[in-house]
Amino acid sequence: KIVDDIENEISNMPSNEIQSKEIGNLVLKRLKNLDKVAYIRFASVYKQFDSIKQFTRELSELQKSK
């Protein structure tokens, strides 16, 4: 489902090219609404967390967005 949604959104974009950063952001957006744990796991790699502080900041933002 998430892959189909992202593929559809990309195919509806006016440009023939899309940066990987944009794809990552689309994935983050979908995961945030679908599965908070999967979101945090993906975000930690995608955003290259290198400290506990970054994790806690992202978790706090996730809690606020409920």
Image: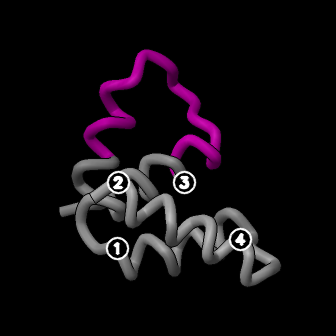
Q: Given contact means CB atoms under 8 Å apart, are the residues at marks 3 and 4 in contact?
A: no
Name the disc covering residue 65, or none.
2
Amino acid found under the numbered disc labelled 2:
Ser
* 8 magenta-colored: yes
Residue found at x 49% / y 59%: 61
Residue range highlighted in magenta: 7-23
Q: Which residue is mark 1?
A: 36
* Observer-nearest of 7 and 58: 58
Q: Which residue is mark 3?
A: 24
Residue 36: name its quadrant.
bottom left
Q: Is residue 28 above or below residue 8?
A: below
Label 2, label 3: how far apart the Cα atoms are: 19 Å
Q: Which residue is mark 4?
A: 54
SS for dot 3? helix
Going by the image, does 34 lie left or right of 64? left
In the rendered image, residue 29, in percent from the top left (x then y), is placed at 39, 51
Which of the two discs, 3 and 4, labels the residue nearer the N terminus? 3
| 2 or 1: mark nearer the eye | 2
Label 3, label 1: how far apart the Cα atoms are: 16 Å
Residue 28: name its quadrant.
bottom left
SS for dot 4? helix
Q: Given contact means CB atoms under 8 Å apart, are the residues at marks 2 and 3 in contact?
A: no
Total numbered labels placed on residues in the image: 4
